[in-house]
Image (cartoon, rainbow, N blue to C red):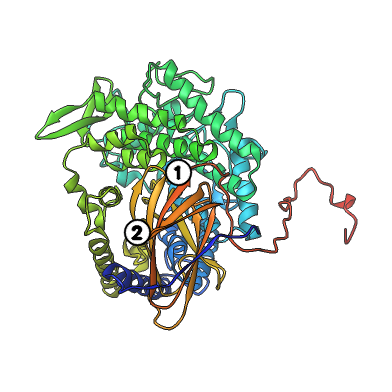
Amino acid sequence: MPQIPTIEATQYVSPANWAVQQRRLIGMMNQVGIAFVDRYTRSDGTLIWKDNWPGMDGSDDAYESFWTFPLFHLVGGSNQIHQLSRKLWDAITWQFTEYGQVYREFDAYYDWMHHGESYSYLYYLGLCDPYIFKDRQRATRFAGFYIGEDAEAQNYDPELKLIRSPLNGSRGPRLEMSREDWSTHRDVLAHYPAPYEDIPGVETERANWNDDETFTTVLGLLNQRMAKGDVPLNLTATSLILHAYAYDNAPKYKQWILEYLEAWQQRTGQNGGIMPDNVGLSGKIGENMDGKWWGGYYGWRWPHGATNLLESTLIAGCNAIMLTGDDRYLDLARSQQDLLWSLGRAENGNWLIPFKHLDSGWSSYGTMNPNLPIQLWNTSESESDLERIKRQANPEGWDSSLNGRDDNGAWFRYVTGDFPDFPDRLLAANIDHVCQKLEMIDNDDTDPASWDVHHWQARNPVFPKGLLQLTTGGPTAVYHGGVLNCRVRHFDPVKKQAGLPEDVSALVDRVSPGRFRLQLVNLNPMQARSVVSLAGAFGEHQFRQFTTGDRTVSVDSKWLQIDLQPRCGITLEIETDRFVNPPKYDFPWEVVDEKLSPIRLRTPDIDPGSVPVGG
């Protein structure tokens, strides 16, 4: 390993409330996470639940119920939490393989809103420990489902640069949906508008999926119009490919991400600047929708409208800039946010944008989630993206994100100097949130056979959102499949694990272009602690210099070690070069890693008799 620049903190400090409460919250979640698992899983980690579960939905909710565990470890949770998160991932994967949703450790087929919810778990596991051979094997295999390396899962058309169906996975594109696929979702979708406006005998405002005749009609049209061809939601698959790239930086993964995003940029240009939400298997926009650029699966009309398109363009753009440093890859996300903004209207002091496009035109007006432009600015740090945030009204209303909503608005106000009470209020809200979840668990005397797939997620007390924002100087990732995008994260060089060392608190309290301010405090009265900090979540940035007090030190490293004497703290003004290193899962210490090629699965083409015994 290269020599890591080191600085010693010898200034005694009286720890601020945020530092004390941060360690209190970490200690609480180390305990309650174990209690939560003990309450809702068997000794092997499988969920105490139903003996069968049909349809294509559900595994995502099970993974979502525990993906906070590896994320918590990344910001300071115990190694016990880390190991438990791995056990739970394996157990859920096995259980939902038995249920029938998962095949070869990956969902057999589903859309990338749900895949994104599931596989964020894997991205955090990679950051926790990049030297787990099983993880590396899985990353290679899963990427192969989408870049054309898997004979069974031919999801991608490399000539037309399209994913062949909105429903895809380890069994390949799902070009024909069955009644059973939707069996667990019929009751939910009975409360949604119909996917189309021209279904004979079906009410447009609310299609009763529970009525067999209506369901048969709707399913037929879904298969005819939506099942075949590409949709913008599939851009979220770029995170899965980035996950594989982060293990060994193989160029083929980078090439796939860029070519797939560029294909959608070209389609948007062909469509007059509006991103089409459906492309047929021939590559034609609106091929199965009578030429309409709207009406695709998770598109401009159904079921949620613009939110899913805006998220997927943002996820892909952020992944591409992480690979290249070229912020023009954010232009697709910017253009669609700007398009909707230009179509907006003023109402009661707010600017409302349309979230849906029907046959009659734009509709369903509401306020834009500030997280969309915040994520742009967090990645680019550009003045133009900052203006996209500032044009929104009522930023004080973003304070509701302290505990519940995932819009990162309060965090943005804090790191740009407009919300000084944020750390104390956030930590108090998070501690209260943990206590509320514990109360729900204590009062849960219901029958597991009656639980739906969100039961555990609603009670999960491991809630590291605030710790992530405070310690890394970044927002929470885009929920439906984004990767972590921050300024710094930390490691314990003594225990040789990711996350803040015991007794250490961290706070990034200012962010500006190419700069941020980091405070570190050692709360232990008798023992020194050391922290190694990494420039970015994946080491994609490079530390250039830091200033503490009247001392400025030049560095040229993605690592920085801070040795904190007992009761001491330090404040560092850090300058970085952004997106100059290939994103990589890495540790700041030497690891003896037996880099094995992926284990090859047996195929029917191999004659067992031709393989020598013992060879």
SS label for mark 2: helix
- Circle number at residue 470: 2
Residue sitting nearer the eye, 97 or 496: 496
Q: Mark 1 points at which residue?
A: 181
Residue sitting nearer the eye, 140 or 253: 253
For residue 333, side relative to residue 407 (left or right): right
Spatial separation of the CA atoms under disc 1 and disc 2: 41 Å
Residue 282's place in the image compared with 57, above or below, is: above
Residue 15's place in the image compared with 160, above or below, is: below
- Circle number at residue 575: none
| Residue 215 appears anywhere in the view | yes
The amino acid type found where label 1 is placed reads: Asp
The amino acid type found where label 2 is placed reads: Leu
Crowd class of label 1 (few under 14; some 14 to 19; many from 20; radius 10 Å): some
Q: Residue at x 90, y 56 (%)?
A: 612
Q: Residue 417, how many percent across, how many down?
A: 25, 50
Residue 599's place in the image compared with 265, above or below, is: below
Of badges 1 and 2, nearer the viewer stands: 2
Q: Residue 286, how many percent across, how many down?
A: 42, 19
Q: Residue furthest front?
A: 550
Q: Which residue is drawn at 61% across and 52% down?
A: 138
Residue 75's place in the image compared with 527, above or below, is: above
| Residue 522 appears anywhere in the view | no
